Image (cartoon, helix red, strand yellow):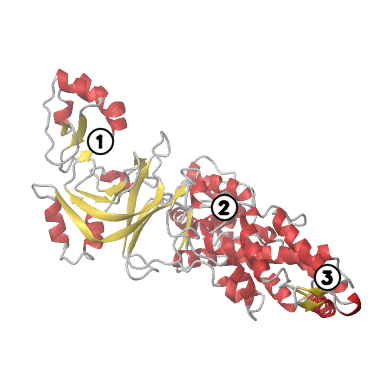
Amino acid sequence: MTMKNGRERNMGGFPRGRLVALVAAFLIGADAAGTTPDAAAHIDGLLASGVHPRLRWERFTDFQEPLRALYLAQGSRPLWLDGGRPVKQASAALECLRMADDQGLNSSDYDADLLGGWIEKLNDDRAASAEEVAQFEVAMSLALMRYGSNLARGRVHPRAAGFALDVASKRLDLPALVQHLARDPRPCEAIAGLESKLPLYRNLKAALPRYRGLAENNDVSALALPPKLSPGDRHGEVPALRKRLAALGFLSQESSSKEPEVYAGDLVEAVARFQERHGLAPDGVIGKGTLAALNVPPAARLRQIRLGLERLRWLPERFEGPFILVNIPSFRLYGYGQDPERPEVSMNVVVGRSSGGHNTPVFHSDMTYVVFRPYWNLPRAITVKEMLPGILRDPGYLARHNLELVPSFGNGSQVYEPSLESLEMLSAGSLKLRQRPGPKNALGLVKFAFPNNDNIYLHGTPSVNLFQRARRDFSHGCIRVQDPVGLAEFILKRQGETWTQERIEEAMNGAQSRTVTLKQPLPVYIYYSTVLAEPDGTVRFFEDIYGLDRVLEQLLEKGFPYPS
């Protein structure tokens, strides 16, 4: 439709002159905000591509959707630029990225140095291009999203690293986080609030500065000691050993000896302390294992700490109420009550052998019942590979090992007498093998059950001598506990009944099997970390018996987007 002289066209109810004025006002406002339609188009195009050509890790498909949501809410207007120049908040947020190393992460993953140089360049340039504006804007928001997500939830999904930890995923609104960081006067405090609240995390994080210093300044040359060095022995490398232990904090820097080449006195005591904190028998004798641990470079220990922090991010942010944690590499169980700082109960455990496919799996479940005087229901693989040959050779094998033949493992199942026919049925798989309750039962006198796909549980054992070994991976996968009475007391005292030590021992030594269903299921975490730290600053390192550190390292080396 035309109006006077056809000079002014009505556009959807707006006179053309008014529309031009509105567009001009929008463009002026856009420039004042630090963007133009061209810059907005570049932002949209960059987000659509999922690739940023200037970054260390170019692909960001894993953060594409939250970035789109952020800039949709922003109308593709920048958060970090004003009039084409970085706002002060950009420099403040950059400092948060530079602190990533203090969390066991890598500031280079978040392009901290690149962004720092970019801010300087944009502040100096008179007119940045629309493409430059868009690239900086997206890079800044992406770096903060990556860092916030990694700090809160970890970089790699636990299942990709062999951890079947089906804990509730930590919810994180990344667009809201970036918007908050863009206006919070203390952005680093805000982003630090995303880190794990677990004391285990806090203790391990506190060890980072010391081991970073050791990695930067310590002598990494290997000690050339003999295959075995016992107290009283003399060797030319003993002074270097003293220096190494002093650098690691196991001896004072002023430590000396009148006979510097004699391995004795405070040096032996320091080695024993070193052994105790590295999962070795603290006997003061330097053998193959101790020498190998002494020669691990501090940089490798620093990597262990960083891997340990990554795994702790996979756990719940905090634990509500009691829980049990079994750390496989340290061969220890910890039962935590109301105080998350210190366990109420701790004990040695035996875990699955690192050979033959018997690794104890890493997972989480809830303990639901305890069985006193349990049967041991033998898995088919153990029956066929380990029991059947002896049974077929020796008719007395079954009776001697307290074994019986049953069609199923349920209560009241018919027991078959040993015969040629029943043994053929056992070989064919139509009969099963179980061990009757008693002190010689492989599960000991109590079993602690938490449903899982691998049929893993905690239990006692008649083979108590194995708990004295420093390395304790001897089982088929289940976890043997050193103090079943103490563990039962820790678990059952929370069930609303009086379960004293005496009552527990009576149930363990009674005439019948007894199952106690827990009124309040107890979370159990079968965990894997080759390093743990204590509230007093003590750091303990353990051997990577299942090779899972290397698996996680290889996944982290891939960079963004990390395996999910």
Instruction: Kindly report which numbered mark, 1 or 3, lies closer to the viewer in this rendering.
Output: 3
**Quarter location, residue 494:** bottom left
Q: Nearer the viewer, residue 417 or 411?
A: 411
Name the kind of residue labelled 3 in the image. Answer: Leu
Instruction: Kindly report which numbered mark, 2 or 1, lies closer to the viewer in this rendering.
Output: 1
Instruction: Kindly report which numbered mark, 2 or 3, lies closer to the viewer in this rendering.
Output: 3
Name the kind of residue labelled 1 in the image. Answer: Leu
Is residue 335 among what the camera can see?
A: no
Q: Position of residue 40 (x, y in %)?
A: 77, 66
Look at mark 3 in the image and give the residue it sits on.
Answer: 122
**Quarter location, residue 402:** top left
Callouts 2 and 1 close, C-beta under 8 Å: no
Binning the other alpha carbons within 10 Å of mark 1 as few (below 14), some (14 to 19) or many (20 upward) gives some
Which type of secondary structure does the marked residue at label 2 adopt?
helix
Q: In the rendered view, would you say 410 is above or below 65?
A: above
Callouts 1 and 3 close, C-beta under 8 Å: no
Name the kind of residue labelled 2 in the image. Answer: Leu
Q: Residue at x 11, y 26 (%)?
A: 417
Callouts 2 and 3 close, C-beta under 8 Å: no
Q: Position of residue 545 (x, y in %)?
A: 46, 44
Q: Nearer the viewer, residue 225 or 173?
A: 173
Which type of secondary structure does the marked residue at label 3 adopt?
helix
Q: Position of residue 297 (x, y in %)?
A: 60, 51
Q: Residue at x 32, y 31 (%)?
A: 381
Q: In the rendered view, would you say 205 is above or below 29?
A: above
Quadrant where the N terminus sits is bottom right
Look at mark 1 in the image and give the residue it sits on.
Answer: 378
Q: Nearer the viewer, residue 137 or 105?
A: 137
